Each structure stands twice: as C-alpha cells, then as structure tokens.
Image: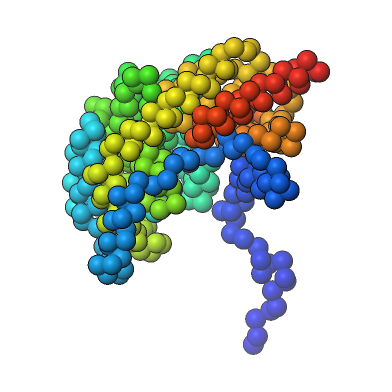
Amino acid sequence: MTAPLAATSSLTRPADRLAGIVPSRIRVVFDLAAELEARGHRVIHLEIGRPDFDTPQVVKDATGAALAAGRVHYGPNAGSWQLRAAVAATLAASGGPRYDPGSEILVTIGASEAVFLAVMAFCEPGDEVIVPVPAWPAYEACVRLAGATPVFLPLDPDDDHVLDPARVRRLLTSRTRMVVACTPHNPTGAVVDPGRLAHLAGILRGSRVLVLADEIYRELVYDGTRHVPVATVADLAERTITVGGFAKAYAMDGWRLGWLAGPSGLVAPALRVRQFTTTCPPTFLQDAAIVALRDTATEREQMRRAFAVRRAGALELLGRQRILRVGRPSGAFYLYLTYPEQLGPADEFTLRLLEDEHVAVVPGTAFDPTGRGRHAIRVSYAASLDDVQEGIRRLIDYATVRADGA
Ligand SMILES: Cc1ncc(COP(=O)(O)O)c(C=O)c1O
C-alpha cells in the first residue's frame, strides 16, 4: 500500500520548536543600509557589533604557516589540545579559574556555538531559563530551539542595566535550569560587580540552576573597571559554564572561534552535542588562535584604548543633551539609549534615522521581546572616532527635531 500523499503545506512545515525563532531585526537595518549604499550614499555604521580593526598580522601569518604545514585535517572534537591549553592559560593568567585543558575546555565555532552547546546539553522542555533583557538575541533563540522556556528578567535603566540578583530570586521556580549572565553585557555595556555575583551565588546555593556566563567582552572594560569572571566567585564555579571567544577583543569575528569552559561534568555533555554538529573547529585556524592568545597583547591594548576614546567621545556628546538617556556603561562597545515615548517606536525611529540622516543603529526591540525596547536604541562605538562623533551628532539633532515636532 502506498503512503497517502502529503499536502504541500505539510512538506514545508518546520518543526514546532522553530515557532518563536524569527529573523533578527538587526537584519532590517543592515539591508536598508546596504540599499542606501548601493544608491551611492555614505552610511555611518553604528549598528555593527564587531571591531572595525583588522585581525593582527601575526595571527594571519600564523594561519599561512599552518596551511603551509598541512594542518588541514580533522582534529579532536574538543578542539586542539594546544589551543585548549592556551585558552586555559589565558583565563588563569587574567584572574580566571584554572581549568584542565583535557576535560574542562572546548574550542567552539565562535561563542555562538558555545552558547548553543551549553543550552542544548542542559535544557529541555519544561525547563526555564532566566534571560536578562535587553540581551543578545541568541540566548532566547537557543533556549527555544532546546524546547525550553525563556523567562525574561528586565534590566533596570535606573540601575545602569546591571543584573540584580534579587530579581533573579523572584523569577526562580522549581523549573529554573539556567540563568544567563552576560558581563560585560550586550547591548548595554553593563559590567556585573563581584558583590552582585556573590549575592547571586547565595541565591543559587543548593539549587540545580546553572549559570551561563557569557564573557566574550571580558577584555573590553574602561575607566579602571575590572572584569570579574563569574566562575571565580565562591560557590559559582561548580555551576558556571563560561563562554568566550576571539570575535571582539581580537578583531577575529570572521574566524568563528570561541570557547566553552567549566567543570568537566558540565563540559562533557556539551562535547556530546558538538560531536554530532560541527565535529571540530578548523585545524589551521586553531593554530593561529594560539598565536592570537599569546602574541597580540599590544594590538589588543591598542584596540581597547581606541574603543575607550570613542566611548568617551560619545558620552561627552550625549552628556550635553537631555532627550536621549544613557548611563556610564563600563564595558563592551555599546551604548543603550532610552528616549521618551513621544519620539515614536524604535523600529520606526531607527529606519527614519537611517533614511534621513544615513546613520545606522539598532532598535531596542531587537534585544528585548518584552516590549520594553520600544523606546530604546543600541549604538555601537566600534567605528572610527570621526564616525562615532558625527553619527551621534546627527542622532542628537534628529532626536531634538522629533521631540520639538512631537
Ligand atoms: C554577548 C555575545 N555573546 C556572543 C556573541 C557571539 O560571538 P561569536 O561571534 O564568537 O560567535 C556575541 C556577538 O555579538 C555577543 O554579543
């Protein structure tokens, strides 16, 4: 007997777990910016979440050498032993925990894969994951792909958007499996201080709640701020999966390399997911990444200082007006600005800013599914100082005109 013919619609019906996975709103801005540029306009790009610098030359040279040496074949599932050792040494040298490269580190395809592996390995239908918002959109998407439920914790602009453990406590249930702690934070630049982390440790003590510590911006802190790795806080190490990578501080976003680190009991399940997804990171790129960790301190500090100057320039301009509200975020390369409702919804605000002033920024709605991002935008200062200043001037003028006309 032949099987009944499937209706066409059932052929293309995606899995239910894709229901909440929608295209990123950041794309809308990208596409319109590209269209304007194709029409010959110069667009100031303050939407981009990546450094405008090139990868340090020593890293490129090391890639060439690795290719020349024939490092083109599969490697270990967890990543090359040498790169895992270099990641472990880097984390330990910068005040992080001491991880065993053999069992406590995975080299991943960007921090993105690290987040995906961590969530897939530990979260399932019925589980809840606390996601502080506004947030990098991938946390929510990964949680949904795992069939778990994101529970959004609103970060308070009056508290500089810093994670408040008391709010975590209010959202905890018997179903909570994970809490996301991104520090420094995208899109707000907020850095979580050790006191709050200790408070979080006390709240989670005795529970089965894991902490997903996204520290990809760990090196990008300013004004003497110190980044405190979540896993170094007493009682958090045993429950913390830390993710990091090369995209931001190393100007290697296109290389797609990152890491996941934690106690072996948390890393081994992530490795089981990895075995049957991406198998292993590219071998020759991993050789170059060792050089990036070991030999680029000078270039990284130069980039960090350049970001610090741009941040200061942006904050100086913003400090002279009252319509766009911003705190003094200590890390990453973003400013998250909130503004009065009368200036209109962020999606429209950003599109008009792009069309009329040729300045690209991201609407807060891209980071906050709760609706609170409706009157907020993210500005990236990972652009030249001239562009950051000119873009912010145009943004301020535009907001002022809209406020006057409202
Ligand atoms: C907080 C955060 N985590 C992870 C990532 C992804 O990093 P990668 O490019 O290494 O996958 C980003 C990229 O924007 C990010 O902002």
Whether residue 201 is visible here, answered yes or no, is: no
Which residue is depicted at the point 21% across and 56% down? 81
In the figure, residue 60 lies in which quadrant?
bottom left
Pinpoint residue 240: horizontal percent, then vertical percent.
31, 37
Which residue is depicted at the point 20% across and 54% down? 82
Q: Nearer the viewer, residue 126 or 110?
A: 110
In the figure, residue 324 lies in which quadrant?
top right
Which residue is depicted at the point 26% across and 49% down? 291
281 lies above or below 72: above
Number of numbered markers: 0
Pinpoint residue 203: horizontal percent, then vertical percent.
35, 24
Residue 232 left/right relative to 173: left
Q: Nearer the viewer, residue 327 or 222?
A: 222
Residue 51 left/right relative to 246: right
In the figure, residue 177 lies in which quadrant?
top left
Image quadrant containing the N terminus:
bottom right
314 lies above or below 276: above
Pinpoint residue 146: horizontal percent, then vertical percent.
48, 50
Q: How is the image coloured?
A: rainbow
Image quadrant containing the C terminus:
top right
Q: Nearer the viewer, residue 150 or 376?
A: 376
Q: Nearer the viewer, residue 102 or 330?
A: 330
Whether residue 217 is visible here, answered yes or no, is: yes
Pinpoint residue 364: horizontal percent, then vertical percent.
61, 31
Which residue is depicted at the point 33% across and 37% down? 300
Q: Residue furthest right?
A: 405
